[in-house]
């Protein structure tokens, strides 16, 4: 996949990125394990796979070859051990970056603890269930312009210009609080739905949750992969998820490796 001119100029100024979460509830969930047993990090082995796949796509041969699960897990554990204890939080967003040199960096941001399985919203049925059982519903606005597909949409990096631009076009702030409260739905130049600025998405169609395929240029997120493996969502093989098919009031399942699954609803500006 070729880079746009403005992206080529940033080839030496970005890192590969994957964000997970550490939370005391996670080891109690039977689905969140690694080779050592129950894990405090959401799907950490999947984050390794995504970083290695991204390194291959970016041509970072050395970084891919040297990246191991033990290195990622150790870097996350060191960051936790060295954290500033001014906060009493024991739940954190864990931001993992990988440089072309193979250098791993991990940073933490405090967050609130999970009180229930963070994937539970994937069982929500708009036909029969009460959405309030799954937490606040996020308003999701449809972008006013398409987002071109590129290496920087199909892999997660620190170069996030297209996502920030989409938020600004619909009047959303780039503050952390705004990211937690609302989002914007993106689509490619062919009019196919891809994702939001921070979540993969699925729409309720024919009594199931349907997610855009990777061929649209969407990010192949770690929770997206897990939900597909579990059969909780299905890929849109017939490409029915188009910008024109999305209506005000449509329910959206939003999911990523930090927040788990959340519910959103298409909202007019």
Image: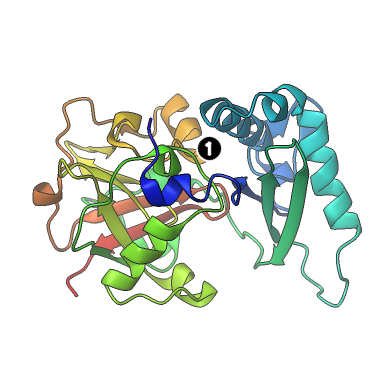
Quarter occupied by residue 88: bottom right
Q: In this view, does 34 lie to the left or right of 70?
A: left
- Closest to the observer: 234 or 68? 68
Quarter occupied by residue 109: bottom right
Q: Which colour scheme is used?
A: rainbow
Q: In this view, does 9 lie to the left or right of 29?
A: left
Q: Can residue 200 be seen in this view?
A: no
- How packed mark 1 is, by other alpha carbons closer than 10 Å (few <14, some 14-19, many 20 or more), is many
Q: Residue at x 85, y 47 (%)?
A: 77
Q: Is residue 114 left or right of residue 169?
A: right
* Total numbered badges shown on the rendered structure: 1
Q: Residue at x 8, y 50 (%)?
A: 244
Q: Residue at x 15, y 45 (%)?
A: 191
Q: Can residue 125 be seen in this view?
A: yes
User: Residue 140, percent across and down?
Assistant: 29, 64
Viewport quadrant of the N terminus: top left
Secondary structure beneath label 1 = helix
- Closest to the observer: 117 or 51? 51
- Closest to the observer: 152 or 22? 152
User: Residue 63, percent across and down?
Assistant: 70, 30
Viewport quadrant of the C terminus: bottom left
Q: Mark 1 points at which residue?
A: 222
State whether residue 30 is above or below residue 75. Answer: above
Q: Which residue is drawn at 60% across and 52% down?
A: 13
Quarter occupied by residue 82: bottom right
User: Residue 194, percent across and down?
Assistant: 29, 44
User: Residue 186, percent across and down?
Assistant: 28, 53
Q: Please identify the residue farthest to the left as the structure is shown.
A: 244
- Closest to the observer: 56 or 205? 56
């Amino acid at each position: 996949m070729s880079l746009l001119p403005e992206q080529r100029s940033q080839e030496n100024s970005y890192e590969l990125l994957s964000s997970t979460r550490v939370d005391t509830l996670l080891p109690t969930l039977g689905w969140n394990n690694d080779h050592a047993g129950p894990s405090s990090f959401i799907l950490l082995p999947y984050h390794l796979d995504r970083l290695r796949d991204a390194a291959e796509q970016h041509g970072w041969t050395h970084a891919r070859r040297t990246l191991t699960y033990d290195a990622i897990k150790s870097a996350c554990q060191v960051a936790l051990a060295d954290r500033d204890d001014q906060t009493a939080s024991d739940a954190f967003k864990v931001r993992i970056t990988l440089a072309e040199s193979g250098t791993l960096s991990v940073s933490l941001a405090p967050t609130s603890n999970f009180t229930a399985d963070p994937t539970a919203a994937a069982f929500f049925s708009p036909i029969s269930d009460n959405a309030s059982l799954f937490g606040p519903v996020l308003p999701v606005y449809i972008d006013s312009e398409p987002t071109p597909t590129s290496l920087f949409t199909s892999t997660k990096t620190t170069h996030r210009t297209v996502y920030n631009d989409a938020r600004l076009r619909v009047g959303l702030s780039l503050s952390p609080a705004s990211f937690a409260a609302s989002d914007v739905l993106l689509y490619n130049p062919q009019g196919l739905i891809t994702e939001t600025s921070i979540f993969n998405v699925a729409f309720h169609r024919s009594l199931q949750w349907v997610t855009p395929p990777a061929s649209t240029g969407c990010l192949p997120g770690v929770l997206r992969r897990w939900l597909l493996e579990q059969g909780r969502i299905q890929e849109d093989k017939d490409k029915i998820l188009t910008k024109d098919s999305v209506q005000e009031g449509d329910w959206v399942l939003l999911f990523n490796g930090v927040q788990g699954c959340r519910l959103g609803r298409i909202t007019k500006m």
